[in-house]
Image (cartoon, rainbow, N blue to C red):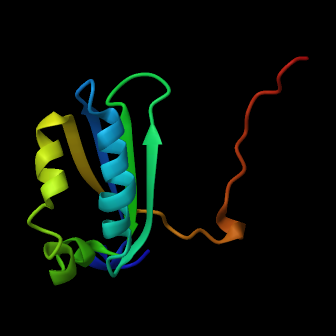
Amino acid sequence: MPADKEARRIVLIAADVEQGFEDEFNQWYDYEHLPERAALPGFLSARRFVAESGEPKYLTMYEVENGEVLTSPAYSDVSPPSQWQTELTPHIQKVVRTVYREITHPVPPEKVKAATRPATQA
């Protein structure tokens, strides 16, 4: 596994949107916010999801090369928010932003243990 500061990060942002503003929110996210972030150096992927049930309704997932990407000058340069974002922000609710550090360890095939499960009856 890479050193801590070199480990990849996943940034998850979950949010709800005030009724009547969802179309505008989705247009802003799809045509401004997501492409702007995805184009930044160190961003590897950017994807959006909608909840099939539960809340918050919307989820965005960014994968970045390492933790330094989120403190880089390029990332800082996307502030202040655009006029569109400023107008829309009061209608975005229950925002939860969490950054996760990858902890996947490479395991050689000979070290992988097969799961032992009781046989099921058909």
Most foreground residue, 31 or 45: 31
> Which residue is nearer to you in this view: 116 or 63?
63
Viewed as shown, does residue 47 lie left or right of 31?
right
Q: Determine the residue positioned at 30% across, 59% down.
A: 33
Q: State whether residue 60 appears in this view.
A: yes
Residue drawn at x 39%, y 22% is 54
Q: Is residue 30 left or right of residue 110?
A: left
- Residue 27: x and y in percent read 36, 48
Q: Position of residue 100 (x, y in %)?
A: 32, 57
Question: What percent of the width, then of the height, locates residue 56?
Answer: 32, 30
**Left or right: 111 in relation to 96:** right
Residue drawn where x is 26% and y is 33% of the image: 21
Residue occupying the far top of the picture: 122
Quick check: 102 above or below 52? Answer: below
Which image quadrant for residue 116?
top right
Quarter holding the C terminus is: top right
Q: Is residue 98 above or below residue 16?
A: below
Quadrant holding the N terminus = bottom left
x, y (%) of residue 39?
Answer: 37, 75
